[in-house]
Amino acid sequence: MNNNQPIRAESSTTPRADLLLEIEQTPEEYLPELIQIVRLFRQSVMMKQTSLNYWENAINEINHGDVVKQQERKTNIKKLFELWNELDEQEEQQETLEIIESMKGISI
């Protein structure tokens, strides 16, 4: 590996070729850190895309989901709040709210 190669001002034909050129110009002792950076970057991009996909799926379900399922959800939520409202003490209501808020994917 020749670390004394001049850095080209112009890009090669593909981003992959540019990346490989940069890797070739990186001193051997820095390659473990470079590998870690590339892996973290790839994982971050993949997680971001996965989150976006989940968000899009949720929005599609809300906007275009089965009408029967939507009505069932509304009914279940209404029943939940009616039961919650019937609880005798404010402390019980607070405990119920904390349970609901601790459930993954539920927000009020």
Image (cartoon, helix red, strand yellow):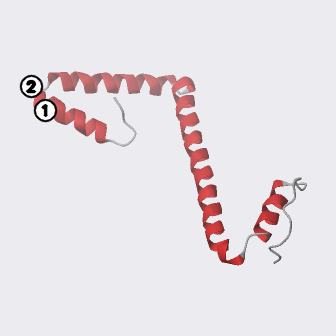
Residue named by callout 2: 88
Residue in the picture at 54% in, 27% down: 65
Mark 2 → mark 1, Cα distance in angstroms = 7 Å
Which residue is more in the foreground, 8 or 76? Answer: 8
Extreme-left residue of the structure:
89
Q: As drawn, is 16 to the left or to the right of 43?
A: right
Residue 40 occupies quadrant: bottom right
* Rendering coords of residue 15 (x, y %): 81, 54
Residue in the picture at 72% in, 74% down: 27
Up the image or down, 16 lies above or below 70; here it is below
Residue named by callout 1: 92
Q: Secondary structure under badge 1?
A: helix
From the image, which quarter does the C terminus lie in?
top left
Q: Dot 1, how many residues are within 10 Å of its Cα: few (below 14), some (14-19), or many (20+)?
A: few
Amino acid type, residue under disc 1 in the picture: Glu
Q: Are marks 2 and 1 in contact (CB under 8 Å)?
A: yes
